Image (cartoon, helix red, strand yellow):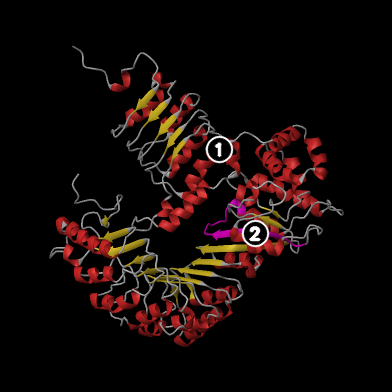
């Protein structure tokens, strides 16, 4: 008898309606043959749950989906370890699977941006009734633990209704009128003068989708609102269409007589999810997201006034590419050619790795008063940093300052160094609005931290000092700063406190007890005695929601005492603690049985004093894989010693 043919050559005689391959190991040849399988052309249900696809090309699946696009009703790719790039490759063909009713992607590690693109590509899938997606990767911290607040925020952004979602519902009479109008471009352009105000946004969207460039130019020139939020459309808007919109503004500037309805004062190019394009009634169509209400109030014209110059152009800048990307290069060139007519405003500015001369040129273009968030990650000499500090001293509305790994190479005498540091720290006195200060791996302020804090004119809401080396004066003077009495978030993660007295921290917690919501003392080298010293004041921080002590060597008895002192902290929603020291053997290896026994005892203590919500216990890094085992976290990074 001849041997059986390989599976890939043994075909069923009738077309398959359902193909379910779950928790199987596919070879390269199996995967590549999938797209050529002749009896899958009428598939209605495709399930590949639990198939590890990480190392496979997405091309076979893409071809298969193209083949069954007209019939497929359910697609299950749960727990397939898909990557962002694999998912992105499938999106164009997925958007053509018009009969899909069930779509499952959860269990894959997908970023926020890739998930957003996925949802945008489902806009035309009007038959969808069940959709299962993973929480974005950005919902988790570095140890893999979920951050509840961040997760809720990101998922809310993803589920918020977007302009593309409107395609899932039957078109309104306004939409149908707009589509009819666009069939005759000349008639559409002539109608703009008398077009009802509520028809402008849907007509603009329709003209954009159909690439009616001349209509778009004329619509920009006749725009009847104070703000045009093009940035919210960046996922559909290409650079070419931005050029079209800006060409419309240029044509308007060349005209002596402006259209009577034009009131545009702000061109918003930020990728923010405002409700402008979702709110099409004339009464509220000019609304924007809560985060930009302040800007709206400052730029919105009264109904009887026309536009004023210069035109504000709003952007958020992330300067980390050399050379700058095509959009920023084009934008800066466009702004430079229209000096006096354009005011370039940036709310969030991030700088990383660009040459100083390039950054200076960009800063010279910006209205520095408008910047509210500044993120600096650069390798600079001290003299360069001092030069740049003069710019941030002009950012009078700066609310958030983030320094990460600013390593300063000094080629100066001690006297020159002190003078430069004085020049740098003095700029903090000009920051009238600073409320959030983040220092990560920054050593240049060692010995001057309290000097900086005392120069601030407003109380801080957030102080985050992570992976920094604090001096004795820094630590001892920390509690004496009057600008820390209203702290909401305090993070000292990775700053070694082992040799310091706990007294400054006790005083700091006492001062902020009425407002503090987050306390992160992870990986601080805190000892049993230090922790015991802060427990009485910790129990008075009644507003605490997030408490992190993991990464410290704490005994079972002290951990028990810590949990007892949290009995009145009823608002706690996330707690992170280290596994007790007694969990480990003499060589530092985890003893699994002892770990579960001790943590069960700790959880019992906690349940006796209050009702816990989300409590995690972290071990030290595993000797095998280098990751932590996290008790109470199903997706724990380390599972080496757990039973299969």
Across and down, in percent, residue 394 comes to 61, 74
Residue hosting label 1:
123
The quarter of the image holding the N terminus is: top left
Q: Residue at x 46, y 25 (%)?
A: 68
On the image, which quarter does residue 39 sit in? Answer: top left
Q: Residue furthest top?
A: 1
* Residue 215, percent from left and from top: 75, 41
Q: Secondary structure at mark 2?
A: strand
Name the quadrant of the C terminus. top left
| Residue 448 is one of the magenta-drawn residues | no
Q: Quadrant of residue 81?
A: top left
Q: Residue at the location (39% across, 28% down)?
A: 46
Contact check, label 2 and label 1, Cβ < 8 Å: no
Q: Magenta stretch containing residue 325, yes or no?
A: yes
**In terms of secondary structure, where does tag 1 sit?**
loop
179 or 130, which lies in front?
130
- Check disc 2 and report the residue beneath it: 314
Graded by Cα atoms within 10 Å as few (under 14), some (14 to 19) or many (20 or more), the crowding at tag 1 reads some
130 left or right of 181 in image: left
Q: Alpha carbon of mark 2 to alpha carbon of mark 1: how far?
A: 28 Å
Q: Find residue 425 and report its horizontal and vertical position in percent.
A: 51, 81
Q: Is residue 579 above or below residue 417?
A: above
Q: Which residue is drawn at the image coordinates 34% and 77% (left, top)? A: 537
Span colored in magenta: 309-327
Left or right: 512, with 186 as reference point: left
């Amino acid at each position: 008898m001849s041997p059986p043919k390989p599976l890939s050559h043994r075909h069923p005689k009738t077309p398959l309606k359902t193909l379910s391959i779950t928790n199987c190991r596919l070879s390269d040849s199996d995967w590549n043959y999938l797209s050529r399988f002749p009896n899958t052309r009428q598939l209605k249900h495709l399930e590949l749950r639990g198939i590890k696809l990480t190392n496979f090309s997405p091309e076979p699946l893409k071809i298969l989906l193209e083949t069954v696009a007209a019939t497929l009703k359910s697609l299950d790719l749960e727990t397939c370890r898909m990557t962002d790039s694999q998912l992105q490759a499938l999106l164009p063909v997925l958007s053509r699977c018009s009969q899909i009713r069930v779509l499952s992607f959860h269990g894959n590690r997908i970023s926020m941006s890739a998930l957003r693109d996925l949802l945008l590509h489902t806009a035309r899938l009007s038959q969808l009734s069940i959709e299962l997606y993973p929480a974005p990767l950005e919902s988790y911290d570095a140890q893999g633990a979920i951050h509840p607040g961040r997760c809720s925020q990101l998922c809310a952004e993803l589920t918020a209704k977007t302009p593309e979602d409107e395609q899932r519902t039957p078109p309104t009479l306004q939409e149908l009128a707009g589509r009819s109008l666009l069939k005759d471009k000349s008639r559409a352009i002539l109608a703009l003068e008398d077009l009802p105000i509520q028809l402008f946004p849907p007509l603009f969207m329709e003209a954009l989708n159909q690439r009616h460039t001349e209509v778009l130019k004329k619509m920009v020139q006749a725009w009847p609102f104070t703000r045009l939020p093009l940035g919210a459309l960046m996922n559909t808007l290409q650079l070419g269409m931005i050029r079209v919109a800006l060409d419309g503004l240029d044509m308007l500037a060349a005209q002596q007589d402006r259209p009577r309805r034009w009131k545009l004062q702000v061109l918003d190019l930020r990728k923010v999810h405002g409700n402008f394009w979702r709110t099409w009634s004339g009464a509220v169509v000019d609304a924007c997201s809560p985060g930009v209400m302040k800007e709206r109030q400052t730029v919105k014209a009264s109904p009887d006034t026309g536009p004023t110059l210069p035109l504000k152009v709003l952007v958020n800048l992330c300067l980390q590419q050399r050379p700058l990307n095509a959009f920023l290069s084009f934008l800066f060139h466009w702004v430079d050619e229209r000096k006096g007519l354009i005011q370039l405003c940036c709310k969030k500015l991030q700088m990383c790795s660009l040459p100083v001369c390039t950054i200076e040129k960009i800063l010279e273009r910006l209205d520095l008063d408008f910047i509210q968030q500044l993120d600096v990650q650069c390798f600079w000499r001290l003299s360069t940093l001092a030069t740049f500090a003069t710019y941030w001293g002009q950012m009078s509305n700066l609310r958030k300052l983030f320094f990460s790994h600013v390593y300063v190479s000094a080629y100066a005498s001690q006297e020159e160094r002190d003078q430069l540091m004085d020049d740098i720290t003095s700029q903090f006195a000009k920051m009238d609005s600073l409320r959030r200060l983040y220092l990560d791996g920054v050593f240049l302020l060692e010995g001057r931290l309290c000097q900086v804090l005392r120069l601030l004119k407003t109380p801080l809401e957030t102080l985050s000092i992570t992976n920094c080396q604090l001096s004795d004066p820094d630590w001892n003077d920390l509690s004496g700063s009057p600008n820390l009495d209203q702290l909401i978030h305090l993070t000292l993660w990775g700053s070694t406190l082992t040799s310091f007295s706990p007294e400054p921290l006790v005083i700091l917690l006492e001062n902020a007890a009425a407002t503090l919501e987050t306390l992160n003392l992870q990986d601080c080298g805190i000892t049993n005695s230090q922790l015991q010293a802060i427990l009485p004041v910790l129990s008075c921080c009644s507003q605490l929601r997030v408490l992190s002590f993991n990464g410290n060597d704490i005994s079972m008895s002290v951990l028990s005492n810590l949990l007892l002192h949290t009995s009145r902290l009823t608002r706690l929603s996330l707690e992170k603690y280290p596994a007790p020291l007694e969990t480990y053997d003499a060589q530092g290896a985890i003893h699994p049985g002892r770990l579960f026994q001790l943590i069960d005892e700790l959880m019992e203590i906690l349940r006796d004093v209050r009702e816990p919500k989300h409590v995690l216990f972290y071990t030290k890094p595993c000797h095998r894989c280098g990751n932590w085992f996290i008790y109470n976290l199903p997706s724990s990074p380390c599972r080496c010693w757990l039973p299969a």
